[in-house]
Image (cartoon, rainbow, N blue to C red):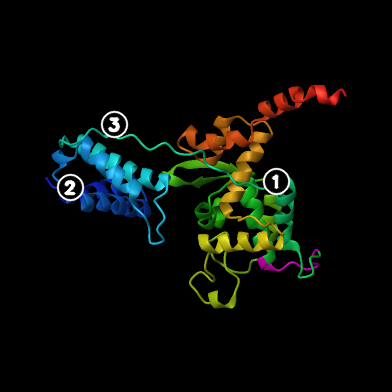
Amino acid sequence: MKLSALLSQFLDYLEIEKNRSLRTRENYRFYLERFIGWAKDPEAGKVDGELVREYRLWLNRLTDGKGEPLKKNTQNYHLIALRSFLKYLARRDIKALSPEKIELGRMPMRQVEFLDAAELERLLDSPLKDPRGLTAKKLSPVMLRDKAILELLFSTGLRVSELAGLKREQVNLERDEFSVRGKGAKLRVVFLSHQAKYWLKQYLGKRGDISPMLFVAHDRAQKGREGGVAGLTPRSVQRVVERYARVAGIAKKITPHTLRHTFATDLLMNGADIRSVQALLGHSSITTTQVYTHVTNQHLREIHEAFHAKRRETR
């Protein structure tokens, strides 16, 4: 059977049986249609190691509209999609290359961007400043909302999509924790700091609308919509973070994910174990969490301080 005839069945399987999001489904469609188009829609049994080797070589030499080669992680996304497709075929006893034969390309160590203590404090304080850079005497609903957003991102390590999707009923301010459904519909518990809890109470106390969403837009264009006002989108939250990073005078690029990185590194630097941080971040694999360890290895820091250049200190 041709791969194109099996593709839609596989995508339905991802959505229904594996509970993958529509976005994930579309990503897999894109990657697999690229392979099928390149390979000229072969029979499943024609997919062998040599064909995959040639495809990997083609991906490695593929360039975008700017003449830039595909990043290694993007190449791996193509291979992950193909490997998942082959696993599905094997489950249906359709002869094709064994998925275990496809190895992912080796990735360079990822650079994690996070805020140091001074940058973090400036960012968290920035929503409370007036145009002169002084602490505002009167805080508007927007200022309170944005302060609560920044504190909540740092307190919980939420992904931007998770935060934008929060509803008021999810966050019980009488408790210091609540549940959130993340990637792959996995449920995890996140915890509120005293600061996050305080500013959420301040913000919700100023709200006069009946929208079920935790964070909403407060401009006139949103008036009159069903539920009173519209909830913030992930892009809106991203713009909030970017704006206050500029206000705080932080030159490097800051996104909501930077606060997630900062949340993780803060925990590890203060002695949390890697498995606990994995659970708090909602990572499926410990490998994903280990990206933080090269910037938070307290043991190596202590070794350096204890033994490096001791003879110079005695002179």
Q: Mark 3 falls on what kind of element?
A: helix
Residue at coordinates 76% horizontally, 70% vertically from top-left?
Answer: 131
The amino acid type of the residue labelled 3 equals Glu
Label 1 environment density (alpha carbons within 10 Å; few <14, some 14–19, many ≥20)? few
The answer to whether residue 276 is seen in the rendering is: yes
Label 2 environment density (alpha carbons within 10 Å; few <14, some 14–19, many ≥20)? many
Q: Is residue 255 above or below residue 185?
A: below
The chief SS type of the magenta part is: loop
Q: Is residue 68 above or below residue 187?
A: below
Q: Along the polypeptide, which appears first: circle 2 or circle 1?
A: 2
Percent of width and height locating residue 125: 74, 57
Which quadrant is home to the C terminus? Answer: top right
Q: Mark 2 falls on what kind of element?
A: helix
The amino acid type of the residue labelled 1 equals Asp
Percent of width and height locating residue 168: 56, 57
- Residue 142 in which image quadrant: bottom right
Q: Nearer the viewer, residue 24 or 163?
A: 24
Q: Residue 89 vs residue 15: left or right?
A: left
Residue at the left extreme? Answer: 1
Q: Along the polypeptide, which appears first: circle 2 or circle 3?
A: 2
In contact (CB < 8 Å): disc 2 and disc 1 = no
Percent of width and height locating residue 279: 53, 36
Residue for badge 3: 100
Q: Mark 1 falls on what kind of element?
A: loop
Percent of width and height locating residue 232: 54, 64
Residue at coordinates 42% horizontally, 45% vertically from top-left?
Answer: 73
Residue for badge 1: 116
Q: Which residues are magenta?
A: 135-142
Q: Which mark is residue 3?
A: 2
How far apart are the two marked residues, 2 and 1, measured between alpha carbons? 50 Å
Residue at coordinates 45% horizontally, 37% vertically from top-left?
Answer: 284
The amino acid type of the residue labelled 2 equals Leu
